[in-house]
Image (cartoon, rainbow, N blue to C red):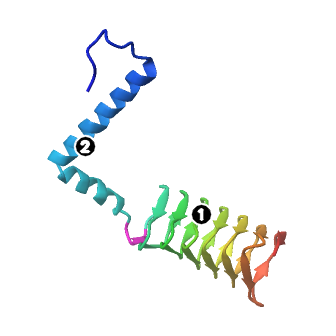
Amino acid sequence: YLPEPGLLEYSPSIAKGYAQELIFARMFIENFEHPERLKEDEDKDNSIPEVINEPCADNITIKKGKTLTVESTVSGELTVERGGVLKLAGISQGKIFVADGGRLELSGTSTGNINNKGTTIANGMIAGTLYNHGRLEIYGMVSGRVTNYAWGKCIVDKAATITGKGKI
């Protein structure tokens, strides 16, 4: 509802606010008239496969309730959100971020940095820097730096090897 022109002088910010409200109203009406468009957008989020067998360069986000197994090389960033599980049996060349409540099971090789706020079980090799804010279990080899913050819990097996500098 806009008053008649000439009754009030509008500042640019008020006019911008009216324009945004009209845009949101138009989007709402289009989604209400065509609900299949919303379903198409939801299906795009679930397009992550369960297993990656071929080299991949994309950035991948594992959402809640999803499990992704990587059996080949991934050069993009991997993000594990709360409730997601990443089983890395291949090679990761990019950064890995494990959010609070996420889980990373590493039996392959990671050459990028790992920022862990959830749970990480490392049976393989980590060549990058590992920052731990959550729970970390090391049973394999870490040739990079390991930094365990005060609120993180770190378990290192007797057979594990850590060759880089670190604060555990």
Disc 1 from disc 2: Cα separation:
35 Å
Amino acid type at circle 1 is: Phe
Residue extending farthest left: 33
Disc ID at residue 20: none
Nearer to us in this view, 57 or 115: 115
Prevalent SS, magenta region: loop
The reply to whether the C-beta atoms of the residues labelled 1 and 2 are less than 8 Å apart is: no
Disc ID at residue 28: 2
The answer to whether residue 55 is visible is no
Spot occupied by residue 63 in the image (x, y as percentages of width and height)? 44, 66
In the rendered structure, which segment of residues is drawn in magenta? Answer: 49-53
Spot occupied by residue 153 in the image (x, y as percentages of width and height)? 72, 79
Local packing at callout 2 (Cα closer than 10 Å; few below 14, some 14-19, many 20+) is few
92 displayed left or right of 32: right
Nearer to us in this view, 72 or 135: 135
The vertical placement of 46 against 83, above or below, is above
Amino acid type at circle 2 is: Phe
16 displayed left or right of 26: right
**Magenta span includes 113:** no
Report which quarter residue 77 is drawn in: bottom right
The vertical placement of 29 against 159, above or below, is above
> Which SS class for mark 2?
helix
User: Would you name the residue on which mark 1 appears?
Assistant: 97
Q: Residue at x 59, y 63 (%)?
A: 97
Q: Residue at x 66, y 74 (%)?
A: 134
Report which quarter residue 102 is drawn in: bottom right
The vertical placement of 38 against 167, above or below, is above
> Which SS class for mark 1?
strand
Local packing at callout 1 (Cα closer than 10 Å; few below 14, some 14-19, many 20+) is many
Nearer to us in this view, 20 or 107: 20
Quarter of the rendering occupied by the C terminus: bottom right
The answer to which of marks 1 and 2 sits earlier in the sequence is 2
